[in-house]
Amino acid sequence: MNDDHVGKLRALAGLATPMALRVAVTLGLPDRLRGTPATAEQLATEQRLSPIALDLLLAHLTALDVLERTGSGYRTTEFGAALCTDADNGLANFLHFNLAGGRADLAFTELLHSVTTGEAAYTRKHGQDFWADLAEQPRLRESFDRQMTHRFREQVPRIVAGYDWGRFDHLVDVGGGVGTLLAAILTAHPGLRGHLVDLEPTAAVADRIFREQGLGDRAVASAGSFFDPLPPGAQAYLLCDILHDWDDEHAHRILARCVAAVPADGRILVIEPVGGRKANTEFELAMLVIFGGRERTLDEFRALGSAHGLALDAVTDLTEQRCLLEFRVN
Ligand SMILES: C[S@@+](CC[C@H](N)C(=O)[O-])C[C@H]1O[C@@H](n2cnc3c(N)ncnc32)[C@H](O)[C@@H]1O
């Protein structure tokens, strides 16, 4: 038996550290202990926690160098400060149990269910699917929209620059979120008009962002579902990080709505990681457990499109993570 292997696998598989970090963020400990130290007893009184159990958590966070001990209690280290809510790195959103990212990751405790059935684990874990949960809890929806905006901060300029959006005069962004990408595309191409479709309240946020950015005369946001008819007649329909959220049955239904709306010389544009090309294995598992979706390979995209008479014309590498697939209506 190789002890190194055992130790490495034990460390990879252990749940104590990931859960300790997430509980720390959910309790707001890195924020509370930044600058002003506190003992376990003080914190336990403030937050009505068990002092003995909390001290065990704080000790482990100290072993991880997230906290340090001072003469007057525990304090957040410089390393641990990256977990603070104002660190502007997306981490707190991603780890907090009551925000969309952290809650979604808890579905990994039901990974066995997903691997057994091919279905999302999220529903089994939380009693309803991800989108229903967001619709019911505004705090989850807001945090998800924030997470989506944050993940694209560096990618948007490259997506805008990496494709000839100016060849169209009207683009529909299907499931366009709060409109960050569409706004950037329209700003770069003054001759282009845009129409974003997403669920409420996200569509309303997009509408406000368009007006704030002076795009109110060229950009519309409609509240609606991409399982219902889409605004017809645009030259291009964009699906950015949409299809990987869905199993094949739903992906077909979304594509069918795009095909019903697009004119014969129009294009359907898919931006997402492509399996075997840009996808990352951990992220792929996340798509499975949260949505029952996956990063499809090019062959899978071709098959998906051809069922709707779509031909995959071009594949453009936009960023390290995402490709743009351009489908033509046959
Ligand atoms: C992963 S996000 C991508 C958002 C945006 N395209 C982007 O890349 O930033 C998926 C989006 O699909 C939207 N969505 C989910 N179900 C929808 C539905 N039935 N109809 C319209 N939009 C939906 C969500 O609200 C969310 O904004």
Image (tube, rainbow, N blue to C red):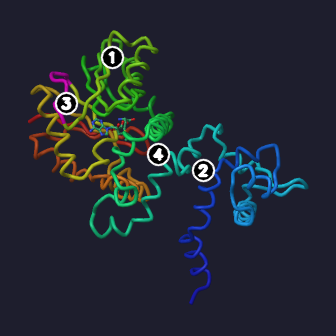
Q: CA distance from mark 1 to mark 2?
A: 38 Å
The residue at the point 38 percent across, 29 percent down is: 201
Residue occupying the far bottom of the picture: 1
Badge 3 density bin: few <14, some 14–19, many ≥20, Cα 10 Å: many
Which amino acid lies under the numbered mark 1 shown in the image of this protein? Ala
Q: Is residue 240 above or below residue 299?
A: above
Q: Who is closer to the viewer here, 43 or 222? A: 43
SS at badge 2: helix
Q: CA distance from mark 2 to mark 3?
A: 44 Å
Q: Is residue 241 left or right of residue 81?
A: left
SS at badge 3: strand
Q: Earlier in the sequence, mark 4 or mark 1?
A: 4
Image coords of residue 32 (percent x, y): 73, 45
Between marks 1 and 3 in the image, the one whose residue lies nearer the viewer: 1
Q: CA distance from mark 1 to mark 3?
A: 19 Å
Between marks 4 and 1 in the image, the one whose residue lies nearer the viewer: 4
Between marks 1 and 2 in the image, the one whose residue lies nearer the viewer: 2
Magenta span: predominant SS is: loop
| 231 magenta-colored | yes
Badge 4 density bin: few <14, some 14–19, many ≥20, Cα 10 Å: many
Q: Which residues are magenta?
A: 228-235
Image coords of residue 258 (percent x, y): 17, 34
- The residue singled out by tag 1 in the image is 219
Between marks 4 and 3 in the image, the one whose residue lies nearer the viewer: 4
Q: CA distance from mark 4 to mark 2?
A: 12 Å
The residue at the point 91 percent across, 55 percent down is: 71
- The residue singled out by tag 4 in the image is 100
Q: Is residue 197 left or right of residue 286?
A: left
- The residue singled out by tag 2 in the image is 26
Between marks 2 and 3 in the image, the one whose residue lies nearer the viewer: 2
Image coords of residue 307 (percent x, y): 10, 46
Q: Is residue 241 above or below residue 173?
A: below
